[in-house]
Amino acid sequence: MCPGPRQAMSEQKQMAGEDNIAYTLGPMQAGPICCDPQPLIQVEDLSLHYGAKAALDRVTLDIHRGCITALIGPSGCGKTSFLLSINRLTDLIPGCRITGRIRIDGRDIHDPLCDVQTLRRRIGMVFQKPIPFPLSIHRNIELPLHEHGITRRADTGPIIEQVLQDVGLWNEVHDRLHSPALRLSGGQQQRLCIARALALNPHILLMDEPCSALDPLASGIVEDLISRLSGRYTIVIVTHNLAQAGRIANYAAFFWTKGQAGQLVEFGRCRQIFESPSHELTAAYVNGVRG
Amino acid sequence: MATLKSIHACRDRFAQFAIYTAAFMVCAAFVWILSDLVLGGAAHLSWDFLVDSPRDAGRAGGIGPILVSTGLVLMVALMAALPLGWTTAVLLAEYISADSSFGYAVRYSLHVLACVPSIVFGLFGNAFFSIYLDMGFSILSGGLTLACMLLPILISTADAGLRAVPDTYRLSAAALGMSRTTTLFRLLLPAASPSLAAGLLLGTGRAVAETAALLFTSGYVDRMPGSLLDSGRTLSIHIFDLSMNIPGGDARAHASALVLITALLLLNVAAMRLAAGWQRRRITE
């Protein structure tokens, strides 16, 4: 549905002439524009407190179906908190309190009738550090499938192969699926975590700086993977790497700490945020003057 | 410059010497005990010694019934303490926040319980299990008294083991829509299994070696026990009795102590192997 961000990627590769370097050192460009925006995640007046401390202050934002939305801004401005509130992982944090409304596909996720486990199945999440479970590669993906009622080997086998293919890991691990996942390299572990999330067939992927703990080469592979996933999934990605946001995202949301709490300063198409920001803070941040 | 260098070298050598000496002394103490036991007891060790009944108040014969009583007391203690202890540990580590007042109260009482001398547990067991619950001097009341002693060890090791499992596993499992129970049984407990095994080992070691708590509860009848309600003499009480009350019982006491130490060593190795194997299986299955 969107013009593939892959095109932009390959252009950059040609420009830089060197595959590995292009990902992290390439010139900052606005990502491709996503056509026909339809809101999938609607956030209204979201405020979030940890105990007495406010972390987010009245954030209102629509995230569009099938697009990649990058959340940018300095550390501590509430980007991760925002991400965690979308799949209600904030429920697990003691003392965390949320006001406001988040609707996904028009349904309020804080509705008492909303089943959290089903919600989290539909929303995959990838964390900053790869977190493979201390199990085998195969079991890492099989365990969540079992949990959601997909238990027959005839069903799980093809799914596991498919998602490993999707993240480009199949060729690397197909002959050692039963060896420990912790023996994989950092980049492979992160791709396994993405595969594990994809296995549950989610609609939305939340990514919290998925490349920041990886070396440039692995980071490039994961970034390439993320841009290939756009269109099929709605992706919300937190990143401190502005060049990366510019390369892969369709939309960008700029957060900034005002007073004590994080606020949304500007939201718009990625190109507009990077090339003609309407707020002076955004301009200062994307040009590297502040933040 | 040269003097500074030599001072540093001197200090380094002294520190090295002190560290090696300390380690050597620790090993020497163990070797001394073990060699004393081997020298005094090895001559009496035989298959007959392990299976025969004691004769002449233990001066002759073997320790068959005593081994059986020890095993039974241990079994009762573990069967009572393990489910209670590990469930409490799961509650403390997974269901209560670390700084809640209830969790604090439970942990504090466990610390106090761990410091209570075993003779006090013995008196408590005698008053509660033997007299109040009318179990008399029996393997059952001895085992249950031991269970009370083991709870603090089992709970604190399992609690610490579960807490040491990174929170990211819990968060990541929750993000995959996994329930708390699945997370607990499939991820957290297997990851904490070395700690559980360590606690089990410490507890078993303590139970096998316990004397004072059993004097007043399981008693020291050295017959083969017919049921859990019979009195039974455990190995450590046998050693105590032979060396303190029976003139001429020293050699058999040495042999019994050698059996006890060997059993503890074997237990140690087995538990470590078990924990390592369990974790490997979980990782590779």
Image (tube, coloured by chain):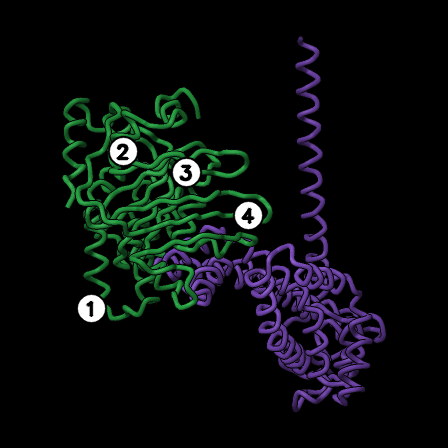
Q: Are marks 3 and 2 on the same chain?
A: yes
Q: Position of residue A240 (x, y in %)?
A: 38, 32
Work out how far the residue at label 3 is from the one at label 4, CA to CA, in angstroms.
18 Å
The numbered disc on residue B133 is none
Q: Amino acid at mark 3?
A: Leu
What residue is pinned by disc 3?
A264
Q: Amino acid at mark 2?
A: Cys
Residue A127 to residue B98: above or below: above
Instruction: Tell me the element at label 3.
Output: strand
Residue depicted at 76% across the width and 71% down the height? B211
Q: Is residue B248 left or right of residue A37?
A: right
Work out how far the residue at label 4 is from the one at label 2, CA to CA, in angstroms.
30 Å
Label the green chain with its letter: A
Quadrant in which residue A18 is drawn: top left
Q: Amino acid at mark 4?
A: Tyr
> Disc 4 or 2, which lies upstream in sequence?
4
Residue A176 to residue B223: above or below: above
Residue depicted at 80% across the width and 76% down the height? B124
Instruction: Tell me the element at label 2.
Output: helix
- In the image, B91 versus B132, the foreground residue is B91
Q: Colour of chain B?
A: purple
What residue is pinned by disc 1?
A154
Q: Chain of mark 1?
A: A
Q: Is residue B285 visible?
A: no
